[in-house]
Amino acid sequence: MPARIHGILVTYHRPDALAAMVEQLAEIGLATLTVVDNGPSPESKEAAHKAAARVPTTYIEMSENTGPAGGYERGMGSVLETADAEDWMLVLDDDRLTGSTETAVALRDFAVRLVEGGERLGAVGQMGSRFDPRLGRLHRLPDEELVGAVKVDYVAGGQMLMIRVAAAREVGVFDADLFFAFDDLDYCLRLARAGYSIYVHGSSGIEARERFGRLGTVGRVERRGSPWRRYYSVRNHILIMRRYTTWPSAVFVTLAHLFGRPVRELTRRQPGRLALISASTRGCVDAWRGRLGRTMEPGPGAN
C-alpha cells in the first residue's frame, strides 16, 4: 500500500474560496482532508462537508483566530494521532492549488524514492528557496537548476509543502506563537536543525513557473501593504533570525527593518507609509521582547 497523503487546510472567513478549494482537493489523491476553520460559519462548514462525500474529511472549528500557524498546529496534531510514520502531510490554504491534480501524488512518489535511497528526508515541495542566515534573505532558484531532486532550505506553505509524518513526530508541529508569516520557514529551519533534508521536485517547479508566468528572471512580488501584515512579517523575521542565526545577523536585520525600509518608503512617498513604519517598529520591539501570538488583529482572509 503506498504512503498516504493527508491534506491540512486552514481557512478564515472565506467560505466561497474554501468551497472552490475543496472541490479541487477531491481530485488530487488525498487519503484524508483536515479543515481547520479559524472563523467558523455555516457556509464554511457546509463547504467542508461537501468534500466528505469524496475524501474522508475532518472539520475543526476553532474558538478563536489562531492564524495559519495555530491552524496548522491543530491540524497536524489531529493527523499525527492516526497517521503512519511513512505517510505525508500536505500543507494547504484556501487561496489556490498551485500544482495540477497530479502534483501531490508526484511529490509523494518523489519523496518515497528519496527515502528509499537513504535520504533523511523531512519535507518536499513543488518550489523552494535557499536561506541566507547572514542577511536573513531567501534566494530564488534559477530555472536551470530545477532538474530532478534539488535540495533547498525552505518550501512555502503555498508551494505544496509536504511533511513526512516520521519527521514531524520527532520535531513537533508548527509554532502557534508565530500566528502569521514565516511559520513555514520556521518549521523548515527546525527540520534542518534536527538533521532532516528538504527537497523540491524540479519538473514540478518548472511546471508551476510556466503556469503562473514566472520563468526566467522575475522581479520581486510586492505583498499587500497592510500594517498588520507588515507587523507580523517583521516580528517573525527577527524571531527566526534570533532562533537560527547569530546575534549580529539578528541585529542587522532588525536595523534594516527599523531604518532601511522606512527610509525607502518615505523617499518614495508610499501610500500609508506612516502606518507601515509604525507597524515595523512595533514588530521589531515585540520580537526582542518575546511578545508572541495574536497581538494585532488581522483582516478577513488572513489565512
Image: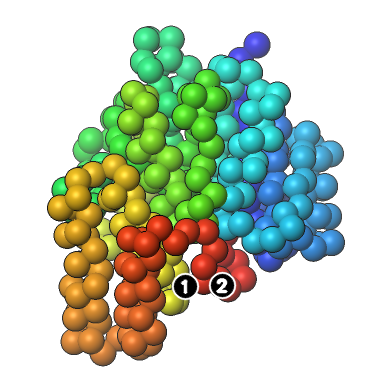
Q: Are marks 1 and 2 in contact (CB under 8 Å)?
A: yes
Amino acid type, callout 1: Trp
**Percent position (x, y) of residue 17?**
66, 60
Q: How is the image coloured?
A: rainbow
Q: Is residue 194 above or below residue 211?
A: above
Q: Position of residue 224 (x, y in %)?
A: 42, 72
**Residue 89 figure quarter:** top right
Toward which corner of the image does residue 128 lie, by quadrant?
A: top left
Q: Which residue is mark 1?
A: 228
Q: Is residue 99 left or right of residue 101?
A: left
Q: Quadrant of the C terminus?
A: bottom right
How packed is label 2: few (under 14 Cα within 10 Å), some, or many (20 or more)? Answer: few
Tell me the quarter of the image containing the N terminus. Answer: top right
Whole-percent x and y of residue 59? 77, 46
Count of numbered tags: 2
Nearer to me, 124 or 169:
169
Please name the residue shown 41% across and 52% down the image: 182
Residue sitting at 56 percent across and 72 percent down? 297
Question: Could you tell me if residue 294 is visible in this image?
Answer: yes
**Left or right for 200, reference 111:** left
Label 1 crowd (10 A; few <14 / some 14-19 / many >=20): many
Whole-number angstrom distance, CA of label 1 to CA of label 2 = 7 Å
Front residue of 138 and 239: 239
Residue that badge 2 annotates:
297
Q: Secondary structure at mark 2?
A: loop
